[in-house]
Amino acid sequence: MAKNQKKENPVPEDVHSGDENAPEQEAPEIEETPDIQEPQQEKPQKDQGQLLAEAADKYLRLAAEYDNYRKRTAKEKDAAWTEAKAQTVAAFLPVFDNLERALKQDTADEAYKKGVELTMKGLQDALTGLGVEMIRALGETFDPNRHNAVMHCDDPESGESTIVEVFQQGFICGDKVIRFSMVKVAN
């Protein structure tokens, strides 16, 4: 320590200065006051059975949440796949319609007719491979969930609400209708 710095000492200097044989004086004791704390209410201790029951309940809830999450994401994934497939197939349906119209036309060139038939067969096979089916319409009972009635007629030979003509073929993939069948219905 430097000479000009004074050493802090709780004991007065006159006690140490001077005579070594003088009785030593002790520094006055400082009483420490205990921290004042508010009385705390004791929380009831949970026994092992309660803790185990709470942990089991939390575990069951977490397991149920995870199971619901897993099912929901699987359902969303399937729906997204079906929707993407439906949009892709819908883009090819005008090609199907054009090939169908070409097949209805008379032609003298058998090679041309055979080429259109093979192309149509290839497109139908590709659609079937994707899980896409044509909606049955001709002769079936009208179903507003699958058919779009654009015309109606009075036909005593056909039953009520029977489809008598198909203007445009409809398609379905699983439970999702890609395109409704455009039909004429007998009343």
Image (cartoon, helix red, strand yellow):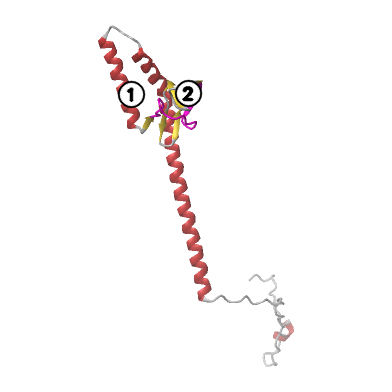
Q: Is residue 80 left or right of residue 35?
A: left
Q: Measuring 52% from the left and 68% from the top, which residue is drawn there? A: 54
Locate residue 138: give its quadrant: top left
Image coordinates of residue 84 in percent, x first then y, are 43, 33
Q: Is residue 171 left or right of residue 122?
A: right
SS of the residue under disc 1:
helix
Please, what is the three-letter code of the amino acid marked with disc 2? Ala
Asked if residue 100 is positioned above or below residue 146 in the image, the reply reads above
Image coordinates of residue 173 in percent, x first then y, are 40, 33
Image coordinates of residue 140 in percent, x first then y, are 41, 29
Local crowd at mark 1 within 10 Å, few (<14), some, or many (≥20)?
Answer: some
Please identify the dominant SS of the magenta region. Answer: loop
Viewer-closest of 91 and 177: 177
Image coordinates of residue 53 in percent, x first then y, are 51, 70
Viewer-closest of 179 and 86: 179
Q: Measuring 46% from the left and 58% from the top, which residue is drawn there? A: 63
Q: Which numbered disc, 2 or 1, marks the residue that appears first in the sequence?
A: 1
Q: Quadrant of the N terminus?
A: bottom right
Viewer-closest of 115 and 18: 115
Marks 2 and 1 sit apart, C-alpha to C-alpha, by: 31 Å
Q: Measuring 49% from the left and 58% from the top, which residue is drawn there? A: 62
Please, what is the three-letter code of the amino acid marked with disc 1? Leu
Residue stretch in magenta: 134-151
Is residue 72 visible in the rendered image? The answer is yes
Q: Which residue is denoted by mark 1 in the rendering? A: 123
